[in-house]
Amino acid sequence: LLALNLRNNPIIQLPSDMSGLPKLEELNLSFCLIHYIPDGFFSFPALQELNLSYNHLTEVPSSVVHLTTITSLNLDGNQLPSLPFSILGLQTLQDLSIKNNFTSSVLWKEYSSKT
């Protein structure tokens, strides 16, 4: 399976282990009811595009750094006041979209605690 589109479904909880989809390149979970991303969720060795837009997310775990092949990450329309500083370490990331969130003046969570 290379692409999985679950857009606009009543998905509330994500599994903590997604290693059963080793070839998945595109995952669309937009317009669901997701509140929380478990740490083990980011176990996609080939994922390039992840759309988590318009859910109810209040936090992105720092384990997002495990998405080593990601090129596009869409987090639009959630309730994210900040993002983990580890997102900046995603070397393949070309497009990060965070429109329509509740971002604060200090966007990078871990960075703000170091200054």
Image: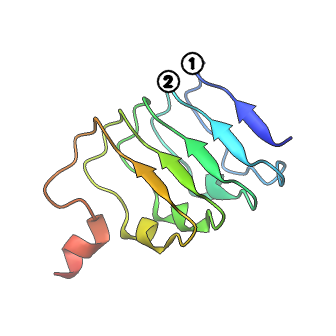
List the residue tagged with mark 1. 8
Up-down relation of residue 66 to residue 103 (above or below): below
Q: Amino acid at mark 2?
A: Phe
N-term-proximal mark, 2 vs 1: 1
**Secondary structure of the residue carrying numbered label 1:** loop
Q: Residue furthest left?
A: 105
Mark 2–mark 1 contact, CB under 8 Å?
yes
Near-viewer residue (105 or 33) = 105
Left or right side of 43 for 99 = left
List the residue tagged with mark 2. 31
Residue under the image location 66 percent in, 64 percent down: 69
Left or right side of 28 for 111 = left
Q: Amino acid at mark 1?
A: Asn
Q: Residue furthest bottom?
A: 115
Rendering coords of residue 24 (x, y %):
78, 48
Q: Which mark is residue 58?
A: none
Residue under the image location 61 percent in, 67 percent down: 66
Quadrant of the drawing holding the C terminus: bottom left
Quadrant of the drawing holding the N terminus: top right
**Secondary structure of the residue carrying numbered label 2:** loop
Near-viewer residue (59 or 51) = 51
Residue under the image location 52 percent in, 46 percent down: 37
Left or right side of 10 for 96 = left
Q: CA distance from mark 2 to mark 1?
A: 5 Å
Q: Residue furthest front?
A: 94
Q: Crowding near pointer 1: few (<14 within 10 Å), some, many (20+)?
A: some
